[in-house]
Image (cartoon, helix red, strand yellow):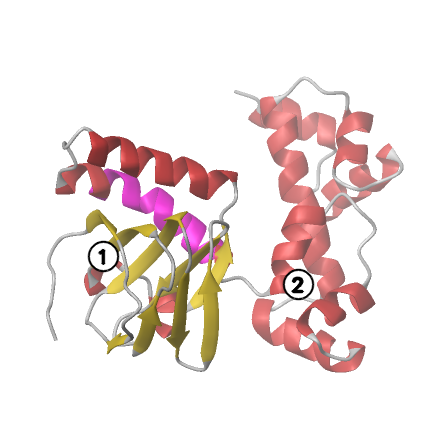
Amino acid sequence: MEKIEEIAAERRTYTANQNTHSHCYAQLILPLQGELFMHAGAQDLRLDHQTLFFIPPECKHTFHSDVRNEFLVLDIPHFMLTKKTLDNKGFSFNLDKQWKGIRYLILNEIDKQSLHSSALKDLYPYISHYLLQEQQPNSIRYIHEHYNENITVNKLASLEHYNRSYYSDWFLKETGKSPSAYIQEVRLNKAKELLQNTDLPILHIAIQVGFEQQSSLTRLFQKHEEITPSQFRKKYRF
């Protein structure tokens, strides 16, 4: 199978003829127009204007399209991938505002005919960061997106299609923490960011990270940082 030494990007179109292959590099497929039908591993997918797909190295996949289409495809060398990405079987995810921004930056360079490998190398750490986020289990991603809400273990378990008892054991193996401890850690880290980077009153910060009272945030800081939120702000404010 062909190896590549540099990350590359180009616009590609696909025909109605089914094509099956695999390669030693990964691919990230971003939609521009139309749709693409793909079978990869045990997954049957229809990629449309709102769906991206990541194909890991050596993943056999079959693809075709019955309509006019165009996709932006990144070919990513094996050595640029993390172990977690390499171990993945391929996954699809939504084209949200972050990925639309990444797509715009790449297309802008392609349209100017100035896309050198150095430009993509500089952009790739940003791409890799979001790829790793997309690989998070649904319930963990949900915590990071809804940490300011009342999150129940039953809700988290349902997102993974597990019963509550099994989910708690699974979560502990996955993160090294209980769901409640993980949620508190996410809230604590978000509160730290707000204390360092904003002038918001501490009560407002407590509410923004999911607490009804300032005292709850204070207890969290005293437990994990051994100082109050106001003391943390004074100590670490730039």
**In the foreground, 82 or 103:** 103
Q: Which mark is residue 139?
A: 2
Q: Position of residue 52 (x, y in %)?
A: 43, 55
Image x and y of residue 186, in percent: 65, 49
Answer with mark 1 or mark 2, whichever residue precedes in sequence. 1
Q: Quadrant of the N terminus?
A: bottom left
Callout 1 secondary element = strand
Image point 72% across, 59% down: which residue?
A: 181
Residue 183 placed where, x, y %? 71, 54
Q: Looking at the picture, which amino acid does disc 2 mark? A: Ser
Task: Indicate the secondary structure of the residue bearing disc 2.
Answer: helix
Q: Is residue 126 magenta?
A: yes
Identify the image quadrant of residue 20. bottom left
Q: Which residues are magenta?
A: 121-133
Inspect this view and state whether residue 110 appears.
Answer: yes
Horizontal side of 123 relative to 170 (left or right) equals left
Q: Which mark is residue 75?
A: 1
For the point 37% across and 64% down, which residue is it?
A: 66
How busy is the neighbourhood of tag 1: few (under 14 within 10 Å), some, or many (20 plus)? Answer: some
Residue 88 on the magenta span:
no
Which callout, 1 or 2, points to the residue nearer the camera?
1
Whether residues under marks 1 and 2 lie with C-beta atoms below 8 angstroms apart, the answer is: no
Residue 65 position, x and y percent, is 36, 64
Q: In the displayed structure, does residue 161 sit left or right of residue 210? A: left
What is the count of numbered marks? 2
Q: Residues within 10 Å of mark 2 (few under 14, many from 20)?
A: some
Q: Which residue shows up at 76% across the image and 43% down it?
A: 148
Real-space Cα separation, disc 1 to disc 2, in angstroms: 30 Å
Q: Which amino acid is tagged 1?
A: Asp
Dominant secondary structure of the magenta stretch? Answer: helix
